[in-house]
Image: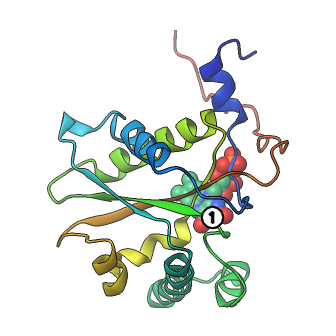
Amino acid sequence: MASNPILENIYARRSVRSFEDRPVREEDINELIKAGFHAANGLNLQKLRFSVVTSRTKLNEYSATGKRTFLEYMAANDMTNPHLESNLRNDGFDIFYGAPAAIFIYAAPGIMTATEDASLAAGNIMLAAASMGLGTCWIGFAYHLGSDKVFLKDNKVPEGHKLLAAIILGYPKNKDQMATPRERPHILNWVR
Ligand SMILES: Cc1cc2nc3c(=O)[nH]c(=O)nc-3n(C[C@H](O)[C@H](O)[C@H](O)COP(=O)(O)O)c2cc1C
């Protein structure tokens, strides 16, 4: 059983897809980015970069672009998933779930561990947010915004930087929702 606040926070975190209509304080967002940047990173190159979007108008625009670019990517790679595609074709579906903020994580050129670094930073951000009463969700549907000129320009993303993660952020509407259940971990073997 969890017996310290860190473990309790890990087990209570869940993806949040419905938010109160109130902004997240800028100092809290800065704290979360700091927590993300404090994650372990390959060779301690510290090459992750972040951008923040709190404009609802822009998030709506990016949701539409995210859906379009994701569908284009699927078509170009012969990927089919009827459920996913029907969501992505639904004009009423907001990939950011009406969140008041999103943090985007990029890798600057020249890191060999870009995906690992960004994923660890995202994990830190989600756990730190949970500890502050904030809800988060990683938005994979946003991946291909990283190749959209408007998004890159708005977010002042330098040439060669790769978008690796998008985390939405806000105060959960339903505070009592339980964490998403997990199976028991599959430990293949324990070689002693
Ligand atoms: C790489 C990655 C991409 C994800 N993309 C999405 C997404 O686009 N939309 C969404 O609603 N949830 C997304 N999720 C959230 C997962 O669905 C969620 O983490 C999973 O169902 C487990 O639930 P939990 O986070 O509440 O424990 C993503 C999670 C990860 C790690």
Residue 20 position (above or below residue 116): below
Write the residue at 79% across / 41% down.
Answer: 181
Q: Residue at x 56, y 37 (%)?
A: 127
Q: Return the x and y of residue 121 as percentages of the image width and height.
A: 41, 43
Q: Nearer the viewer, residue 150 or 179?
A: 150
- Of 26 and 130, which appears nearest the observer? 26
Percent x, y for residue 63? 56, 80
Tell me the quarter of the picture where residue 9 sits.
top right
SS at mark 1 in the image: loop
Q: What quarter of the picture does the N terminus occupy?
A: top right
Q: Position of residue 64 (x, y in %)?
A: 55, 86
Q: Is residue 160 above or below residue 88?
A: above
Q: In this rendering, is residue 67 above or below 111?
A: below
Number of labels in the image equals 1
| Colour pattern | rainbow
Using a 10 Å C-alpha cutoff, classify the residue at mark 1 as few (fewer than 14 neighbours), some (14 to 19) or many (20 or more).
Answer: many
Q: Is residue 95 left or right of residue 55?
A: right
| Residue topped by disc 1 | 99
Q: Is mark 1 within 8 Å of ligand 1?
A: no
Q: Amino acid at mark 1?
A: Ala
Question: Quick check: which quadrant has ligand 1?
Answer: bottom right
Q: Nearer the viewer, residue 191 or 144?
A: 144
110 versus 154 height, above or below? above
Q: State the image coordinates of residue 7 (x, y, percent, origin top left).
A: 64, 22
Residue at image position (76%, 37%) is: 183
Q: Is residue 92 left or right of residue 32?
A: right
> In this view, which residue lies farthest toward the top?
192
